[in-house]
């Protein structure tokens, strides 16, 4: 990065440490130092040659990396786990161990994860106001009907004061079970499983097939592929368009 003037929060985000919004929280909390001086002013301008620290960590620019990954079942989507369960970082190669996921998939779920060290990108892609569609292929116990689909679209209270919505269509029936395509615009914890439990049709299998314009094409379980700069720009353009449509 050439020597230039830049907002402190933008610099922190461009280094892949966190999003600009989170950087503002660190600044307001007095956790950011520039050349040894604690900075609490939002919008503070620095030179990219200044020495920035959060806690004891020096914040330096890193190449921004983006991958799409086909998560297999049996692993949780977190960097550290207090219960010592297996995580995706136990099987991802070292070269992408520093990347954080955009959203999560629970242990038993499979499918698409996007991982990156671009904090702003994570925030934009996962922010509820942008409403990025996430598509899932779900097999549920029993035979759902049209009324079940209507109930999900109107909303189900999966936790006290927490209403979950989903758009769903029946793809086919497999014996006594139902295969669905479900589209979510929220990111609530175990949302699909709780909705289908409420309807009396527990999930047998759940796979995320796409997030916005990104899908699983060309990936096998456990594989990842780097997103090229052109693909990343296409996603950012898509997010800008969605953001305008939802304001």
Image (tube, helix red, strand yellow):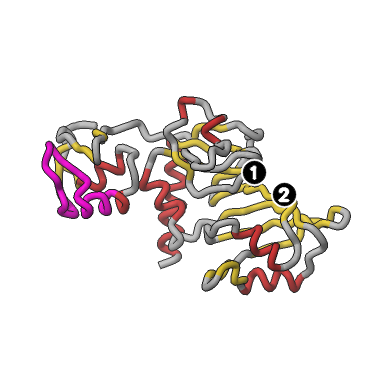
- Whether 188 is drawn above or below 6: the answer is below
Q: Residue at x 12, y 37 (%)?
A: 35
Circle 2 packing at 10 Å, graded few (<14), some (14-19), many (20+), is some
Q: Residue at x 14, y 45 (%)?
A: 38
- The residue nearer to you, when weighing 50 against 135, is 50
Q: Residue at x 15, y 40 (%)?
A: 34
User: In screen coordinates, is 108 left or right of 178?
Assistant: left
Q: Give the spatial CA distance, label 1 vs label 2.
A: 8 Å
Residue 168 location in percent, x, y? Answer: 68, 63
Circle 1 packing at 10 Å, graded few (<14), some (14-19), many (20+), is many
Where on the picture, by quarter, is residue 141?
bottom right
Residue 180 location in percent, x, y? Answer: 73, 57
Residue 240 location in percent, x, y? Answer: 41, 55
- The residue nearer to you, when weighing 88 against 81, is 81
Please name the residue that numbered disc 2 is placed on.
205
Please name the residue that numbered disc 1 is placed on.
110
Whether residue 31 appears in magenta in the rendering, the answer is yes
Dot 1 or dot 2: first in sequence order is 1
Residue 58 location in percent, x, y? Answer: 24, 33
Residue that protrudes farthest toward the right in the picture: 175
Whether residue 214 appears in magenta in the rendering, the answer is no
Q: Quadrant of the C terminus?
A: bottom left
Residue that protrudes farthest toward the top in the picture: 94
Q: Quadrant of the N terminus?
A: top left
Q: Of helix, strand and loop, which one carries label 1?
A: strand
Q: Residue at x 42, y 43 (%)?
A: 233
User: In screen coordinates, is 30 left or right of 128?
Assistant: left
User: In screen coordinates, is 205 left or right of 6?
Assistant: right
Q: Are marks 1 and 2 in contact (CB under 8 Å)?
A: yes
The magenta span reads 23-43
């Amino acid at each position: 990065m050439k020597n230039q003037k830049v907002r402190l929060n933008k610099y922190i985000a461009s280094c892949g440490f966190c999003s600009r919004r989170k950087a503002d929280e660190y600044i307001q909390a007095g956790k950011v130092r520039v050349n040894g001086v604690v900075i609490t002013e939002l919008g503070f301008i620095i030179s990219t040659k200044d020495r920035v620290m959060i806690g004891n960590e020096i914040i330096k620019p890193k190449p921004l990396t983006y991958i799409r990954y086909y998560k297999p079942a049996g692993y949780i989507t977190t960097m550290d786990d207090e219960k010592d369960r297996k995580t995706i970082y136990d099987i991802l190669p070292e070269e992408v161990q520093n990347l954080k996921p955009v959203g999560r998939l629970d242990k038993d779920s499979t499918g698409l994860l996007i991982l990156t060290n671009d904090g702003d990108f994570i925030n934009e892609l996962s922010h509820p106001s942008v409403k990025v569609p996430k598509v899932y292929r779900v097999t549920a116990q029993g035979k759902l009907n049209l009324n079940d689909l209507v109930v999900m679209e109107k909303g189900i209270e999966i936790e006290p004061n927490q209403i979950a919505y989903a758009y769903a269509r029946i793809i086919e029936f497999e014996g006594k079970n139902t295969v669905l395509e479900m589209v979510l615009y929220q990111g609530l914890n175990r949302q699909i499983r709780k909705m289908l439990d409420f309807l009396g049709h527990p999930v047998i299998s759940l796979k995320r097939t796409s997030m916005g314009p990104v899908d699983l094409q060309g990936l096998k379980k456990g594989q990842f592929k780097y997103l090229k700069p052109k693909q990343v720009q296409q996603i950012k353009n898509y997010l800008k368009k969605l953001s305008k449509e939802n304001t």
